[in-house]
Image (cartoon, rainbow, N blue to C red):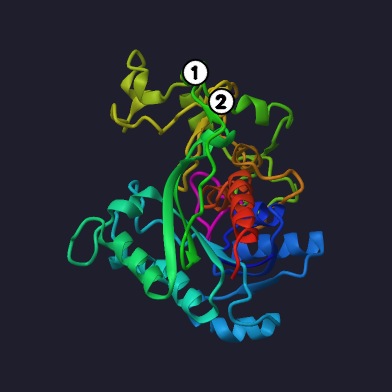
Amino acid sequence: MKAISLFSGAGGMDIGIRQAGFDILAEIEYDEHCYSTLRAAIDREGTRTKAIHADIKTIDPVRLLSELDITIGELDLLFGGPPCQSFSLAGKQLGLGDKRGPLLFEIIRFAEKIKPKAILLEQVKGLLSAKDVKNRRGEIFESFLIGLESVGYTPKWRVIMAADFGIPQLRERLFVVAVRGKNDFLFPERTHAPIEECNGLFQLEPYAGIGSVINNLGPPAPKIRGQTVYDREDSHVDVTPERDRERIAQVPEGSYLAAQVHLGEELRRGLSPKDTTKYLRLHRNRPSNTLRCGEIFYHPTENRYLTPRECMRIHGYPDNYYLKGPIRSRTGTVRNLDQHRQIANSVPPPLAKILGIQIARYLNEQDF
Protein backbone atom coordinates (compact mmCIF):
# COMPACT_ATOMS: atom_id res chain seq x y z
CA MET A 1 0.00 0.00 0.00
CA LYS A 2 1.19 3.49 -0.84
CA ALA A 3 1.25 6.45 1.55
CA ILE A 4 2.34 10.10 1.74
CA SER A 5 3.40 11.74 5.00
CA LEU A 6 2.65 15.41 5.72
CA PHE A 7 4.22 17.31 8.66
CA SER A 8 6.55 14.35 9.10
CA GLY A 9 8.57 15.78 12.00
CA ALA A 10 11.18 13.37 13.34
CA GLY A 11 9.39 10.45 11.67
CA GLY A 12 7.72 8.74 14.63
CA MET A 13 4.41 8.29 12.83
CA ASP A 14 6.24 7.30 9.65
CA ILE A 15 8.15 4.52 11.42
CA GLY A 16 4.91 2.95 12.63
CA ILE A 17 3.05 3.36 9.33
CA ARG A 18 5.99 1.79 7.50
CA GLN A 19 6.08 -1.09 10.01
CA ALA A 20 2.36 -1.60 9.32
CA GLY A 21 3.25 -2.43 5.72
CA PHE A 22 2.86 0.88 3.90
CA ASP A 23 5.35 2.14 1.34
CA ILE A 24 5.82 5.82 2.18
CA LEU A 25 6.47 7.54 -1.12
CA ALA A 26 7.15 11.03 0.25
CA GLU A 27 7.71 12.84 3.54
CA ILE A 28 7.20 16.61 3.73
CA GLU A 29 8.78 18.56 6.60
CA TYR A 30 9.63 22.22 7.15
CA ASP A 31 11.94 22.07 10.19
CA GLU A 32 15.52 21.66 9.03
CA HIS A 33 16.64 19.45 11.93
CA CYS A 34 13.66 17.09 11.55
CA TYR A 35 14.32 16.96 7.83
CA SER A 36 17.91 15.93 8.55
CA THR A 37 16.61 13.16 10.81
CA LEU A 38 14.28 11.91 8.06
CA ARG A 39 16.98 12.15 5.40
CA ALA A 40 19.44 10.17 7.53
CA ALA A 41 16.86 7.40 8.09
CA ILE A 42 16.17 7.13 4.36
CA ASP A 43 19.88 6.95 3.55
CA ARG A 44 20.51 4.36 6.27
CA GLU A 45 17.57 2.10 5.42
CA GLY A 46 17.82 2.51 1.66
CA THR A 47 14.12 3.23 1.15
CA ARG A 48 12.87 4.99 -1.97
CA THR A 49 11.01 7.62 0.06
CA LYS A 50 11.33 11.16 -1.30
CA ALA A 51 12.13 13.59 1.55
CA ILE A 52 10.95 17.13 0.83
CA HIS A 53 12.21 20.09 2.87
CA ALA A 54 9.58 22.74 2.21
CA ASP A 55 6.69 24.81 3.50
CA ILE A 56 3.71 22.57 2.82
CA LYS A 57 1.69 25.53 1.51
CA THR A 58 4.10 25.73 -1.45
CA ILE A 59 3.56 22.10 -2.50
CA ASP A 60 1.28 21.35 -5.46
CA PRO A 61 -0.33 17.97 -4.57
CA VAL A 62 -1.07 17.00 -8.18
CA ARG A 63 2.46 17.79 -9.31
CA LEU A 64 3.77 15.75 -6.38
CA LEU A 65 1.72 12.74 -7.50
CA SER A 66 3.15 13.09 -10.98
CA GLU A 67 6.70 13.17 -9.59
CA LEU A 68 5.91 10.02 -7.59
CA ASP A 69 4.47 8.32 -10.69
CA ILE A 70 1.03 7.58 -9.23
CA THR A 71 -2.39 8.72 -10.36
CA ILE A 72 -5.18 10.61 -8.61
CA GLY A 73 -7.19 8.20 -6.45
CA GLU A 74 -4.42 5.59 -6.31
CA LEU A 75 -2.86 6.65 -2.99
CA ASP A 76 -3.95 4.42 -0.12
CA LEU A 77 -3.14 6.67 2.84
CA LEU A 78 -2.46 10.36 3.43
CA PHE A 79 -1.34 10.94 7.01
CA GLY A 80 0.27 13.49 9.30
CA GLY A 81 0.23 15.51 12.48
CA PRO A 82 0.11 19.28 11.83
CA PRO A 83 1.80 21.59 14.39
CA CYS A 84 -0.22 21.33 17.60
CA GLN A 85 0.92 24.40 19.56
CA SER A 86 -2.04 26.47 18.33
CA PHE A 87 -4.51 24.10 20.00
CA SER A 88 -2.55 22.66 22.94
CA LEU A 89 -4.15 23.11 26.35
CA ALA A 90 -0.64 23.77 27.68
CA GLY A 91 -0.11 26.70 25.31
CA LYS A 92 -1.76 30.02 24.56
CA GLN A 93 -4.55 28.33 22.53
CA LEU A 94 -4.50 30.96 19.79
CA GLY A 95 -6.13 28.55 17.33
CA LEU A 96 -6.44 30.04 13.86
CA GLY A 97 -4.96 33.27 15.22
CA ASP A 98 -1.61 31.46 15.32
CA LYS A 99 0.05 31.23 11.89
CA ARG A 100 0.45 27.48 12.46
CA GLY A 101 -3.26 26.94 13.13
CA PRO A 102 -4.51 26.99 9.51
CA LEU A 103 -1.95 24.31 8.58
CA LEU A 104 -4.49 21.80 9.90
CA PHE A 105 -6.58 22.40 6.77
CA GLU A 106 -3.69 21.61 4.41
CA ILE A 107 -4.66 17.94 4.77
CA ILE A 108 -8.05 18.77 3.25
CA ARG A 109 -6.37 20.65 0.37
CA PHE A 110 -4.22 17.61 -0.38
CA ALA A 111 -7.15 15.21 -0.05
CA GLU A 112 -9.31 17.20 -2.44
CA LYS A 113 -6.60 17.18 -5.12
CA ILE A 114 -5.17 13.66 -4.88
CA LYS A 115 -8.16 11.70 -3.45
CA PRO A 116 -6.44 9.17 -1.16
CA LYS A 117 -8.48 6.18 -0.04
CA ALA A 118 -7.91 7.01 3.63
CA ILE A 119 -6.66 9.89 5.79
CA LEU A 120 -5.07 9.67 9.24
CA LEU A 121 -4.65 12.82 11.31
CA GLU A 122 -3.00 13.17 14.74
CA GLN A 123 -3.54 16.24 16.89
CA VAL A 124 -3.71 17.33 20.53
CA LYS A 125 -7.10 16.77 22.14
CA GLY A 126 -7.29 20.54 22.72
CA LEU A 127 -8.43 20.77 19.09
CA LEU A 128 -11.82 19.42 20.21
CA SER A 129 -12.50 22.59 22.24
CA ALA A 130 -10.37 25.11 20.32
CA LYS A 131 -12.12 28.40 19.54
CA ASP A 132 -12.41 29.92 16.08
CA VAL A 133 -11.79 33.57 15.20
CA LYS A 134 -15.27 34.42 16.55
CA ASN A 135 -14.39 32.81 19.89
CA ARG A 136 -16.77 29.88 19.40
CA ARG A 137 -15.54 26.80 21.26
CA GLY A 138 -15.19 23.62 19.21
CA GLU A 139 -15.82 25.36 15.90
CA ILE A 140 -12.35 24.74 14.46
CA PHE A 141 -12.70 20.97 14.77
CA GLU A 142 -16.25 21.15 13.47
CA SER A 143 -15.03 23.13 10.47
CA PHE A 144 -12.32 20.56 9.87
CA LEU A 145 -14.83 17.70 9.86
CA ILE A 146 -17.15 19.62 7.57
CA GLY A 147 -14.19 20.33 5.29
CA LEU A 148 -13.42 16.61 5.03
CA GLU A 149 -17.05 15.85 4.25
CA SER A 150 -17.16 18.56 1.59
CA VAL A 151 -14.42 16.79 -0.40
CA GLY A 152 -16.05 13.36 -0.11
CA TYR A 153 -14.68 11.89 3.11
CA THR A 154 -16.49 10.50 6.16
CA PRO A 155 -14.47 11.04 9.35
CA LYS A 156 -14.37 9.12 12.61
CA TRP A 157 -12.31 10.26 15.59
CA ARG A 158 -11.13 9.10 19.00
CA VAL A 159 -8.87 10.37 21.79
CA ILE A 160 -6.31 7.62 22.44
CA MET A 161 -4.09 7.15 25.49
CA ALA A 162 -0.71 5.75 24.47
CA ALA A 163 -0.40 3.79 27.74
CA ASP A 164 -3.56 1.87 26.78
CA PHE A 165 -1.49 0.18 24.08
CA GLY A 166 1.61 -0.74 26.09
CA ILE A 167 3.58 2.47 25.59
CA PRO A 168 4.97 3.69 28.95
CA GLN A 169 3.59 7.22 28.62
CA LEU A 170 0.34 8.89 29.72
CA ARG A 171 -0.01 10.62 26.38
CA GLU A 172 -3.50 11.46 25.09
CA ARG A 173 -3.90 12.50 21.48
CA LEU A 174 -6.77 12.92 19.06
CA PHE A 175 -6.77 10.69 15.98
CA VAL A 176 -9.08 11.14 13.00
CA VAL A 177 -9.54 8.44 10.36
CA ALA A 178 -11.46 9.51 7.27
CA VAL A 179 -12.31 7.41 4.22
CA ARG A 180 -14.05 8.06 0.95
CA GLY A 181 -17.77 7.38 1.18
CA LYS A 182 -19.22 5.21 3.96
CA ASN A 183 -16.94 4.76 6.97
CA ASP A 184 -17.15 1.47 8.89
CA PHE A 185 -13.64 1.79 10.31
CA LEU A 186 -13.25 0.62 13.91
CA PHE A 187 -10.49 1.98 16.12
CA PRO A 188 -8.41 -0.70 17.89
CA GLU A 189 -9.42 -1.59 21.42
CA ARG A 190 -6.98 -1.02 24.25
CA THR A 191 -4.74 -3.82 25.47
CA HIS A 192 -3.47 -2.24 28.71
CA ALA A 193 -4.98 -0.44 31.70
CA PRO A 194 -4.10 0.81 35.19
CA ILE A 195 -3.39 -2.21 37.37
CA GLU A 196 -6.57 -1.72 39.41
CA GLU A 197 -8.59 -2.26 36.22
CA CYS A 198 -6.85 -5.48 35.19
CA ASN A 199 -8.81 -7.95 37.29
CA GLY A 200 -12.11 -7.77 35.45
CA LEU A 201 -13.66 -9.83 32.66
CA PHE A 202 -11.45 -8.32 29.97
CA GLN A 203 -7.89 -9.58 29.59
CA LEU A 204 -5.89 -6.37 29.93
CA GLU A 205 -2.23 -6.02 30.77
CA PRO A 206 -1.16 -3.46 33.39
CA TYR A 207 0.40 -0.21 32.21
CA ALA A 208 4.11 -0.48 31.46
CA GLY A 209 6.56 1.47 33.62
CA ILE A 210 9.46 3.41 32.14
CA GLY A 211 11.98 1.32 34.07
CA SER A 212 11.35 -1.54 31.65
CA VAL A 213 12.59 0.49 28.68
CA ILE A 214 15.42 2.70 29.98
CA ASN A 215 17.19 0.30 32.34
CA ASN A 216 20.05 -0.94 30.14
CA LEU A 217 21.37 2.13 28.37
CA GLY A 218 24.39 2.67 30.58
CA PRO A 219 25.82 6.06 31.63
CA PRO A 220 25.14 9.00 29.30
CA ALA A 221 27.79 11.25 27.81
CA PRO A 222 28.25 14.47 29.80
CA LYS A 223 27.20 17.84 28.46
CA ILE A 224 30.07 19.96 27.20
CA ARG A 225 29.75 23.65 27.96
CA GLY A 226 28.64 25.63 24.91
CA GLN A 227 28.26 22.52 22.76
CA THR A 228 24.96 21.47 21.15
CA VAL A 229 26.11 18.94 18.53
CA TYR A 230 27.61 15.65 19.73
CA ASP A 231 29.44 12.83 18.00
CA ARG A 232 27.48 10.27 20.03
CA GLU A 233 25.04 8.93 17.45
CA ASP A 234 22.57 7.44 19.94
CA SER A 235 21.85 10.87 21.56
CA HIS A 236 22.34 9.47 25.07
CA VAL A 237 23.65 12.81 26.36
CA ASP A 238 23.08 14.43 29.77
CA VAL A 239 22.37 18.18 29.60
CA THR A 240 21.61 18.81 33.30
CA PRO A 241 23.05 22.02 34.85
CA GLU A 242 24.67 21.59 38.26
CA ARG A 243 22.08 23.74 40.03
CA ASP A 244 19.30 21.55 38.67
CA ARG A 245 21.09 18.48 39.98
CA GLU A 246 21.12 20.00 43.46
CA ARG A 247 17.40 20.72 43.33
CA ILE A 248 16.25 17.37 41.94
CA ALA A 249 18.43 15.50 44.45
CA GLN A 250 15.87 16.49 47.10
CA VAL A 251 12.93 14.92 45.23
CA PRO A 252 11.96 11.27 45.82
CA GLU A 253 11.11 8.93 42.96
CA GLY A 254 7.70 9.68 41.48
CA SER A 255 7.35 13.14 43.05
CA TYR A 256 8.13 16.76 42.17
CA LEU A 257 9.99 19.63 43.80
CA ALA A 258 7.00 21.85 44.65
CA ALA A 259 5.59 19.02 46.81
CA GLN A 260 8.68 19.03 49.04
CA VAL A 261 7.29 21.67 51.39
CA HIS A 262 9.74 20.68 54.12
CA LEU A 263 12.60 22.12 52.07
CA GLY A 264 13.65 25.74 52.26
CA GLU A 265 12.29 28.37 49.90
CA GLU A 266 15.73 28.65 48.31
CA LEU A 267 15.30 25.22 46.67
CA ARG A 268 11.61 25.66 45.79
CA ARG A 269 12.04 29.24 44.61
CA GLY A 270 9.66 30.26 41.82
CA LEU A 271 7.47 27.15 42.13
CA SER A 272 3.83 27.05 43.17
CA PRO A 273 1.79 24.03 44.37
CA LYS A 274 0.42 23.81 40.82
CA ASP A 275 3.87 23.14 39.34
CA THR A 276 3.46 19.37 39.33
CA THR A 277 5.53 18.73 36.18
CA LYS A 278 8.44 21.06 36.87
CA TYR A 279 11.31 19.19 38.50
CA LEU A 280 9.28 16.00 38.18
CA ARG A 281 11.18 12.81 38.90
CA LEU A 282 9.58 9.88 37.07
CA HIS A 283 8.91 6.51 38.71
CA ARG A 284 10.36 3.31 37.29
CA ASN A 285 7.15 1.34 37.81
CA ARG A 286 4.81 3.90 36.25
CA PRO A 287 4.30 5.37 32.79
CA SER A 288 5.88 8.75 32.11
CA ASN A 289 3.84 11.91 31.95
CA THR A 290 3.36 13.19 28.39
CA LEU A 291 6.72 14.15 26.93
CA ARG A 292 6.44 17.87 26.16
CA CYS A 293 8.42 20.51 24.30
CA GLY A 294 8.74 22.94 27.20
CA GLU A 295 10.00 20.55 29.86
CA ILE A 296 12.23 17.53 30.31
CA PHE A 297 11.48 15.16 33.16
CA TYR A 298 14.06 13.70 35.50
CA HIS A 299 15.51 10.20 35.68
CA PRO A 300 13.87 8.01 38.36
CA THR A 301 17.04 7.37 40.35
CA GLU A 302 19.79 9.61 38.95
CA ASN A 303 20.00 13.37 39.53
CA ARG A 304 19.68 14.39 35.91
CA TYR A 305 17.25 15.01 33.08
CA LEU A 306 16.26 12.21 30.73
CA THR A 307 18.50 12.06 27.69
CA PRO A 308 17.03 12.21 24.16
CA ARG A 309 17.66 8.47 23.79
CA GLU A 310 15.78 7.70 27.01
CA CYS A 311 12.87 9.80 25.73
CA MET A 312 13.03 7.84 22.47
CA ARG A 313 12.83 4.58 24.43
CA ILE A 314 9.77 5.86 26.32
CA HIS A 315 8.19 6.94 23.02
CA GLY A 316 8.89 3.58 21.37
CA TYR A 317 11.52 4.51 18.79
CA PRO A 318 13.78 1.63 17.70
CA ASP A 319 17.39 1.81 18.86
CA ASN A 320 18.67 1.89 15.28
CA TYR A 321 16.86 5.16 14.61
CA TYR A 322 18.97 8.27 15.14
CA LEU A 323 18.06 11.91 15.57
CA LYS A 324 19.99 14.68 13.86
CA GLY A 325 20.36 18.28 14.95
CA PRO A 326 21.35 19.91 18.24
CA ILE A 327 20.87 18.66 21.79
CA ARG A 328 20.03 21.91 23.50
CA SER A 329 21.34 22.68 26.98
CA ARG A 330 18.59 23.64 29.42
CA THR A 331 19.75 27.26 29.52
CA GLY A 332 20.58 27.60 25.83
CA THR A 333 18.66 28.16 22.63
CA VAL A 334 18.91 26.66 19.16
CA ARG A 335 17.36 27.43 15.83
CA ASN A 336 14.29 25.27 15.16
CA LEU A 337 13.75 21.97 16.99
CA ASP A 338 16.33 20.38 19.26
CA GLN A 339 16.30 16.62 19.77
CA HIS A 340 14.16 16.53 22.94
CA ARG A 341 11.47 18.55 21.16
CA GLN A 342 11.68 16.42 18.02
CA ILE A 343 10.59 13.46 20.13
CA ALA A 344 7.94 15.33 22.14
CA ASN A 345 6.31 16.56 18.93
CA SER A 346 6.13 13.10 17.38
CA VAL A 347 3.68 10.20 17.47
CA PRO A 348 4.90 7.09 19.35
CA PRO A 349 5.86 4.65 16.57
CA PRO A 350 4.17 1.59 18.19
CA LEU A 351 0.85 3.44 18.35
CA ALA A 352 1.16 4.54 14.73
CA LYS A 353 1.86 0.92 13.78
CA ILE A 354 -1.29 -0.31 15.55
CA LEU A 355 -3.42 2.30 13.79
CA GLY A 356 -1.69 1.63 10.48
CA ILE A 357 -2.39 -2.10 10.68
CA GLN A 358 -6.04 -1.40 11.48
CA ILE A 359 -6.33 0.99 8.51
CA ALA A 360 -4.59 -1.49 6.17
CA ARG A 361 -7.01 -4.25 7.18
CA TYR A 362 -9.95 -1.96 6.60
CA LEU A 363 -8.72 -0.87 3.17
CA ASN A 364 -8.14 -4.49 2.14
CA GLU A 365 -11.81 -5.22 2.83
CA GLN A 366 -13.08 -2.31 0.72
CA ASP A 367 -13.84 -2.03 -2.98
CA PHE A 368 -12.62 1.40 -4.09
C-alpha separation, residue under disc 1 versus residue under disc 2? 8 Å
Q: Pick whichever, 321 or 61, lies toward us.
A: 61
- Check disc 1 and give the amino acid type: Gly
The C terminus lies in which quarter of the figure? Answer: bottom right
Q: Residue at x 28, y 30 (%)?
A: 272
Determine the main secondary structure of the stretch shown in magenta.
Answer: loop
Q: Residue at x 64, y 54 (%)?
A: 361
Q: Pick whichever, 17 or 296, lies toward us.
A: 17
SS label for mark 1: loop
The N terminus lies in which quarter of the figure? Answer: bottom right
Name the image quarter holding residue 191.
Answer: top right
Q: Which residue is mark 1?
A: 200
Q: Is residue 151 above or below residue 308?
A: below
Q: Residues within 10 Å of mark 1 (few under 14, many from 20)?
A: few
Q: Mark 2 and mark 1 in contact (Cβ < 8 Å)?
A: yes
174 horizontally vs 167: left or right: left
Name the image quarter holding residue 35.
Answer: bottom right
SS label for mark 2: loop
Q: Residue at x 47, y 70 (%)?
A: 107
Q: Is residue 122 magenta?
A: no
Residue 337: x, y in percent? 54, 58
Residue 274: x, y in percent? 29, 30
* One can see residue 177 in this view: yes
Q: Residues within 10 Å of mark 2 (few under 14, many from 20)?
A: some
Tag of residue 277: none
Q: Residue at x 34, y 50 (%)?
A: 126
What span is colored magenta in the figure? Answer: 327-338
- Check disc 2 and give the amino acid type: Leu
Q: Is residue 121 above or below residue 268?
A: below
Q: Which residue is mark 2?
A: 204
Residue 7: x, y in percent? 53, 65
Residue 137: x, y in percent? 22, 56
